[in-house]
Amino acid sequence: MDSTRVTEHPTSHERRQPSAARPTAPADPRGALLRTPEPPAQGSTGLPAQGRPAEAPVPPGIPGAPASDGQGPTGSPTPSGALAAATGTPAASGTPAGSQGPPAPSGGHGPTDAPTGSGSEHSQPSVTEPDPHRPRPAPEAIPAQSGAEAAAAQSGKERRTGQGPAPGTPMPMRRDGDRLRFVGAATRRIARGIDLDEIVMGLCRATVPTFSDAILVYLRDPLPVGDERPTGPVVLRLRRTDRIPEDRDTEGFLLPALQPEPDLGITAELCTVRPGGALNEVLRGVRPVFADAPAARAALPELIGEDLTVPGGQRAILAPLRGRRRVIGAALFLRRPDRPAFETDDLLVAAQLATHSALGIDKAVLYGREAYIADELQRTMLPETLPRPTGVRLASRYLPAAETARVGGDWYDAIPLPGSRVALVVGDVMGHSMTSAAIMGQLRTTAQTLAGLDLPPQEVLHHLDEQAQRLGTDRMATCLYAVYDPVAHRITIANAGHPPPVLLHLGGRAEVLRVPPGAPIGVGGVDFEAVELDAPAGATLLLYTDGLVESRLRDVWTGIEQLREKLAATAQLTGADHPPPLEALCDEVLDMLGPGDRDDDIALLAARFDGIAPSDVAFWHLDPEDAAPGRARRLARKALSRWGLEELTDSLELLVSEVVTNAVRYTSRPVTLRLLRTDVLRCEVGDDVPQLPRLRQARATDEGGRGLYLVNKLARRWGATRLSTGKVVWFELNHG
């Protein structure tokens, strides 16, 4: 019967047993990678290691003891450093041949320390037992030290020169554990960046002065995004530099010329990578190289310029920056001539820094492209500028829910209508994502089209509801649609589940308008009701989305009451006879938002009702007969004389005659003629024929077709709008 001892290895969540109760671990062929060998005995060469509490040696012949295979201590291979072992990089022996060195570990244990615990590499130490410092092997790139050298190292002196570092200069990393800790801290700092500049700055701040005395970071110009294939030659631009400030001369090397700003003057800012050149070969190789390597000696002048030099020997590392698919730049790490040179293991550190930085830059570029697309989408979905309709002044604001989510479903709009009216619209699609923004754009376009048909507000909401159902069963939105008539000083409002508007009167009283709430758009099968209210001159109507008045800290009706009080308090600042300026009023309204009140997008539309006085309006009905154009000219002449605008008589008579003639030629009902005097003189002619006139170039043999050509040449603006009962043709003339 086989009497081989079976030992259980605890998992990572089990506690490690005290040393007295630990079973003896069997030999493990992976011990060189899983466990750290013990420090050499007194008098042996090698770096001094931190000791651990002494334990009883394990006798030979049991699992875990040194194997007696005929190899003595001098013939045992020296274990690799932690960094080289983790990456699988072969390294030279740290002990010269024939010298006294530590014995070879068998099963992961040294001859002087046979741990009785067999916990896995992920197991945790006991709570009651302090975690001792584990001994570390000598890095393979560092030769074994004699007793004098070890004493010098312990005193902080440099091994090659025997001199200590300059005051204020960081100690060089002499152990693999130091490098691992530095790489971990540096990569965490680089990963904290979210945009390109933060990542590049994180790389510079993490490496200077801990790893290098100076750094230059070059990136492709322009940086490729995602899977796109850049065309043309590869151009590297100096993105950022950093260095340790120094006051003393460094024998004309590159370091004194380095500045934190990209525009260095002396350093080449742009570099074109020649196909087949030395720099191209180094970038294609991906691996960092020392400056004294044959490939780097030819590549560095191409990168930094022919007139510049870098410190000689192994005091410069050129590391390509490779993203997910291609090389996107290069980083140059430099050390001063009076500082210790880089070592072989430092190439692994540079590779880790370059890899993490390149991947972070790739993600930052993708994030920047997505943010740009979101900004452009939101900007095109909302009106760039508001119109300036007659008798009303407008102001608006839009705030996204957060800087990281700049798109949403909130929108506002102001649409001029026939008869100097204006449609005021504000809506909110559920959510604040790219999908919400796309649905919002479709609903806004539908609302503009329906407004052009001059439909009543309740009919507009009904058609929007049908459009939302065609887009999908879960496409929900709220909307408020209002039409303001400056001549009648009335406003007609229909609501689809939206917060009610607030009307600020001229005397400073703020009123929440009583509008039937209605069902949200997308529910289907519901009717919408419109109400007509007074809109006195000097009053201000405020339309908004629920993000302004509702949050996790307050309900919607509490927010509406706070908004009403804010408007009333703001109006008191300017007095009872002077309404507050619109732009300042919008800013004051947004100031009511507290630190925790930004849960949703906010759209705000403010309309100041100026109206048109009855004395500035002239209105007539004309029968569809041949004498109608002559009568229209006489009525227009009398109105201009009453208003003191005789200088426009000739132009107005000619244009009115042409438009009225076109109207009475095809209609069978009376034609309407209206003149409005505001900052411009506006003439409107309406009939019951739905066909809109089109401007065309009349031929020499045509008897007609020149009326609209004259209107287009003489009028400031003109247009034609289809109504539910026909159409209106209008034009405007400037006056003094």
Image (cartoon, rainbow, N blue to C red):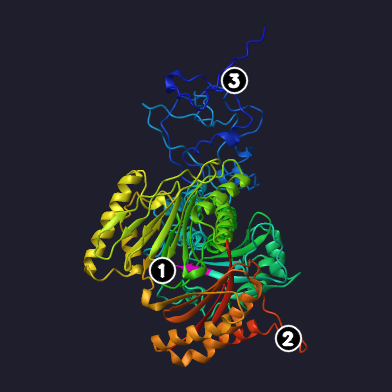
Question: What's the CA distance linking mark 3 and mark 2?
Answer: 122 Å
Q: Which mark is residue 703?
A: 2
Taking the spot 75% from the left edge, 70% from the top edge, the residue there is: 275
Magenta stretch encompasses residue 242: yes
CA neighbours of label 1 inside 10 A, class few (<14), some (14 to 19), many (20+) = many
**Please, what is the three-letter code of the amino acid marked with disc 2?**
Glu
Please tell me whether mark 2 or mark 1 is closer to you in this view.
2
**Measured along the vertical axis of the image, is residue 17 above or below residue 543?**
above
Kindly identify which residue carries mark 1.
486
Q: In which image quadrant can residue 722 be found?
A: bottom right
Q: Which residues are magenta?
A: 240-244
Secondary structure state at the residue bearing disc 1: loop
Kindly identify which residue carries mark 3.
61
Question: Percent position (x, y) of residue 563?
Answer: 31, 54
| Residue 357 seen in the current view | no
| Residue 640 seen in the current view | yes
**Please, what is the three-letter code of the amino acid marked with disc 3?**
Gly
**Please, what is the three-letter code of the amino acid marked with disc 1?**
Pro
Nearest the camera: 325 or 147? 325
N-terminal of the pair, mark 1 or mark 3, is: 3
Question: Percent position (x, y) of residue 655?
Answer: 57, 85
Please tell me whether mark 1 or mark 3 is closer to you in this view.
1
Q: Quadrant of the C terminus?
A: bottom left
User: As drawn, is 242 to the left or to the right of 284?
Assistant: left
Nearest the camera: 551 or 617? 617
